Structure formats: structure tokens, C-alpha cells
Image (cartoon, rainbow, N blue to C red):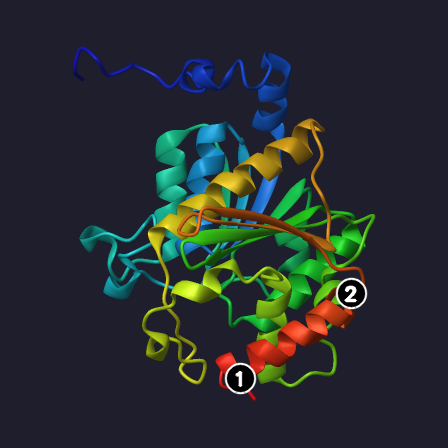
Amino acid sequence: MTANQPSAFDYDAAISRNIGWVTPAEQQRLRGARVAIAGLGGVGGAHLLTLARLGIGRFRIADFDRFEVHNFNRQAGAFMSTVGRAKCEVMAEMARDINPEAEVVGFDGGVDEGNLDAFLDGVDVYVDAIDFFAVEARRMLFAACHARGIPAVTAAPLGMGVSLLYFSPRAMSFEQYFRLEGCDRQEQFARFIAGLSPAMLQRGYLVHPEAVNFAAQRGPSTIMACDLCAGVTGTAVLKLLCGRGELKAAPWAMQFDAYRQKLSFTWRPGGNANPLQRLLLRFVRPLLRLG
């Protein structure tokens, strides 16, 4: 042990610089809260570490995947030392390295109907970080949260920016907003993109469109977008858990694009059934080669 290394973990010392932006009482509320995060890749890993440093004390985390070299550009747990290791295991270790007292329960097979109840049991906020293409799992989780009265947040890494959607159990549901029921898989992708990004701030600077390949379920990504997602999501979770400040629920969406230096708030009553969204979908489908 070096002279600068503490002999034991001290929660109050570890999060002391949070105090001022939160009260000591609010910090204890965060310490006792339980947050569920499904998906531990680009945004999910960043969410977990951000919330652990915020002082959240209890987590349910889920991911069935393992780290690979192509994750290096954006994923918090991707290192040469973790290639081939389970994302759930690696990220749990990293969260506990920040807060050894944290309760981190991992679901290394992902979330399905068989363990959904256990994953959401006692959860105060759900944070969505599932892969874009995992439509069925996402719909299942958001429906379960709405039915159980659990606030749910999703932040999409779009280009070099972020789009935030908050689904309140007392307002419009995920399904009411995106309107995916009865659509084939390709149309679901188009509707998900349109619903995530009504302002489409990222559309003007995709310089190599060939990198988007929906048939191969592959698209470009940046670490800047993932870190922005973690920042706005961490703030949303803090506001929900501490009951502080306004957080606009769907059909409101917020998008900030760092590349274009633009912030947009959109309001789409009816979600993707809104006339503006119908027009946007006519634009999106050909771009995604779904036309």
C-alpha cells in the first residue's frame, strides 16, 4: 500500500465532490437506489460507470455478449486485457472497483421472459442500452416497466450527439410512441430511428454512407456520442431519483448534436402517428434502404 492509497473504502469520501450539486440527503437517496441497465456495450458500459461514480448503490445489469476488438472505439470495458471476456462480468468488476460496497447483480445471459421479473424486481429506474437491432427485447422491457410503474430512459448515440427519451409510467408508453405493433422488422427499424431522432440533427455529416448496413446489422459509432449519452442519462436518473427539476416525458424528445452545436426539443403527440413523423418516415425509409 502506497502513502496515497486508502486503507479502506469510504463512500462519503469517494462521492464528496458530488455534494453541492446534490445535498447529503439526496446523496444517501442515490446510495440506496436500484437502477437496472440492459446492454453493456457503447452506451451501457458508460451508463454503469457514470452512475457508479454518481454514487448509485445498487444495480441490475444484463448482457450476453463478450468483448471484441471492434468494440474498442466506444465501449468502456473494451481493452486488450478483456477481449473474449463476458461484458457483464467485466463491467461488474469495474463498477465494484469504483464502489466496493455496491450491489451489482449480473444477468450474463441477457434478459428474457424467464428472468424479466427478477431483473426488474425492486428497480427504481430502468436505463435502456440494448443494441439498436434488438427490437423484441427492447419492446418487452419497456412494456414491463410501464406495467410495473418503473420510469424508463433511453439515450441514443447518434453521430456525434445524443437523443434522449424518457417514458413515464404515467404518460405515453414506448409502444404508443414508436407504434411498432404489426410492422415487419425493417419497418420497425425505420420507426425506431424516426422516433429516436425527430430532429435528425445528425443526418448532414454522415461522410461514408456505405458504413450503414442494416442487412448485416452494423452501423458507425463514436465514443463522443456514447459519453454524451451517459451524461444526459445520469442527469435524468438523478432528477428522477431525487424528484428534482422537470424531465419532459414522451412524446417530448431532446437531441443535442456536438458536431453541429445544436440543441432541439421536439413534441410529437401520437408519436410516429403524428403527421410530421409520417413525413419523416418517408424520408428515413430510403436512407435505410428500406424503401
Q: Amino acid at mark 1?
A: Pro
* Residue at figure coordinates x 63%, y 15% from the top left: 25
Q: In the structure shown, which secondary structural element does the residue marked by tag 2 occupy? A: helix
Judging depth in this view, the residue of 279 and 251 nearest the camera is 279
Q: Residue at x 59, y 49 (%)?
A: 264
Q: Please report contact status of discs 1 and 2: CB closer than 8 Å, yes or no.
A: no
Quarter location, residue 69 = bottom left
Provide the secondary structure element on which disc 1 rests.
helix
Which of the two discs, 1 and 2, sits closer to the camera?
Answer: 1
- Which residue is most to the top? 3
Left or right: residue 269 compared with residue 26 = right
Q: Identify which amino acid the numbered label 2 is placed on.
A: Gln
> Quarter of the image containing the C terminus?
bottom right
In the rendered image, the vertical position of residue 28 relative to residue 77, given as above or below: above
Which labelled disc corresponds to residue 286? Answer: 1
Q: Please give the label number shown on residue 228.
A: none
- The percent position of residue 42, horizontal first and vertical second, equals 40, 55
Q: What residue is pinned by disc 2?
A: 176
Left or right, 263 with respect to 95, comes to right
Residue 278: x %, y % from top left: 71, 75
Q: Residue at x 51, y 58 (%)?
A: 201
Quadrant containing the N terminus in the rendered view: top left
Locate residue 61 relative to residue 79 in the image: left or right.
right
Give the left or right position of residue 74, taking residue 289 as reference. left
Image x and y of residue 288, in percent: 50, 80
